[in-house]
Image (cartoon, rainbow, N blue to C red):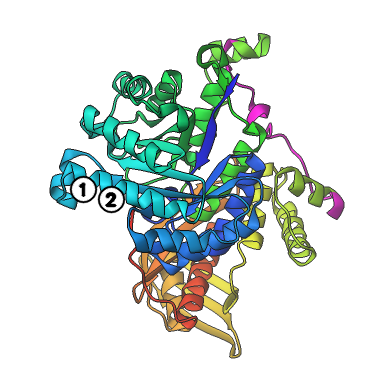
Amino acid sequence: MERIIIFDTTLRDGEQAPGCSMTLEEKVRVAQQLERLNVDVIEAGFPIASPGDFESVRQVSRSVSKPTVAALARCVEADIDRAGEALEGAEKGRIHVFLATSKIHREHKLKKGRAEIIKLATDGIRRALSYRTDVEFSPEDASRTEPEFLREVVEAAIDAGATTINIPDTVGYAVPAQFAELIEMLISKVGNIERAVISVHCHDDLGMAVANSLAAVKAGARQVECTVNGLGERAGNCSLEEVVMGIATRRDFFGVETDINTRQIMNASRLVSTVTGVQVPPNKAVVGRNAFAHEAGVHQDGILKKKSTYEIMRPEDIGLASGHLVLGKHSGRHAFRTRLEELGIHLDERHLDHAFDEFKRLADKKKEIYDEDIEALVREEVEEVPEIFKLVGLHTTSGMDVTPTATVSVDVAEEGVKTDAAIGDGPIDAVYRAIDRITGIRCELRDYSIHAITGGKDAMGEVALEIASNGFSERGRAARTDIIEASALAYVAAVNRLVKRMRNGAQPEEKLHGM
């Protein structure tokens, strides 16, 4: 069978989604998981957009060896030079240049004619070729570009040396039949099309990103650009897990395959959810917690008799644990470490010791410990949150007709333990006000969410939040059986990240967005 190239842009387009920025360390962790997933290309960033994006591409290039690492650039000399510089350490590197081609973009954004667009595109491709032989070109907003002009641009781009031509549905405007026709037109009418791979990059504004991508594959596209969990600007991108499992499950229809290690899909989904703080909806295809749940009696009866009656995929094929009890209070350190490794989590000895201690404490409070509990427990270990402030004591009072009050003790680096109290609209608000009094930093709570890791009254509650202060925003996350404690720990984690950035002299950045 022909092979479909999976181009993952979680670290670039996915990170452009509001509130989804990742630290450098988080990007490297995601890139290493994408390598375990066996994606073909990792688009690591937009180097000209910010120093952080530049460093992201550099570090990812040095952290993975199997996938090609791509850097995005406009058809502008400075962008391309910056991308080339960022990719210097890449074993396999690609420069991905883009330029808008639709009439609405030409007239209102670029204010340039057709001939100018073609010249800018070909000049950009040639400059990119001075750094890398692997060059991808994207005519931005291709799905709304006049077909005859798109054909002309694509042909010129291939003549200039582009080895991949990506057709973006930038604003999610296309529908599957129309998008397939567009790909078929390019294959039949671009004279030199056999010299390049046709790629697609679809957004989900109308909920058709995966459908459009799969229609394009059926029409002859051989690369799909996608993100883990469908993360991305506005309504998001084509979901990697959905398009990969669509191809795998309906191999009979599509007649193609990918090299993706599908058993790493759940690990990738959970990691991206962790580092971005964006929860996966329970009804999300493939990776949602209800994707393999069966409640209706007729469905349960069918599943018990033969799983394929209501399951077209096996949970094991995407690396989904069955959710059975895996460890308990009598489990040892070796069993704990082995289970972490099976879940794709690798800790050094120091972090393993601390995580095991936390596991034992949890085991004393919670009778049944599931994989999801273990993953939530060790997230704080792998996130490497600086401990400028450390929560050491917490007491709250609240109730009907009672003013919510919190007393908080925080160990402040080089200053010792400080204790303060505050009142608030509720116990968590009171805790946050008390922490602000101790740290001296007044923070705005921009986002706050809590969800139960598993079912049951003793389930751990995981809190994910975002705070802002002095032009910076940071995220924090923590899980405990006590949701007020989890809320406090998540807040302190976010404050620590915020202070670290301020002390390192970082400046607020406004990032450029592409495609």
Residue 17 in sight from this viewpoint: no
**Image quarter hosting the N terminus:** top right
- Graded by Cα atoms within 10 Å as few (under 14), some (14 to 19) or many (20 or more), the crowding at tag 2 reads some
From the top left corner, tell me how far across and down residue 451 is, in percent: 50, 47
Query: Seen in the image, is 326 located left or right of residue 267?
Result: right
Residue, x 64% and y 22% (percent of image)?
314
- The label on residue 120 is 2
Q: Is residue 314 magenta?
A: yes
- Residue 429: quarter of image: bottom left
Inter-mark Cα distance, 2 to 1: 6 Å
Residue, x 48% and y 82% (percent of image)?
503
- Residue 266: quarter of image: top right
Mark 1 lies on a secondary structure that is helix
Q: Amino acid at mark 1?
A: Glu
From the top left corner, tell me how far across and down residue 31 is, in percent: 59, 51
Query: What residue is pinned by disc 1?
Result: 116
Query: Seen in the image, is 120 located left or right of residue 294?
Result: left
From the top left corner, tell me how far across and down residue 293 is, in percent: 56, 26
Residue, x 50% and y 35% (percent of image)?
240
Magenta part of the chain:
309-334
- Graded by Cα atoms within 10 Å as few (under 14), some (14 to 19) or many (20 or more), the crowding at tag 1 reads few
Tag 2 near tag 1, CB within 8 Å: yes
Q: Amino acid at mark 2?
A: Leu
Residue 444 in sight from this viewpoint: yes
* Number of marks present in the image shown: 2
Q: Nearer the viewer, residue 194 or 369?
A: 194
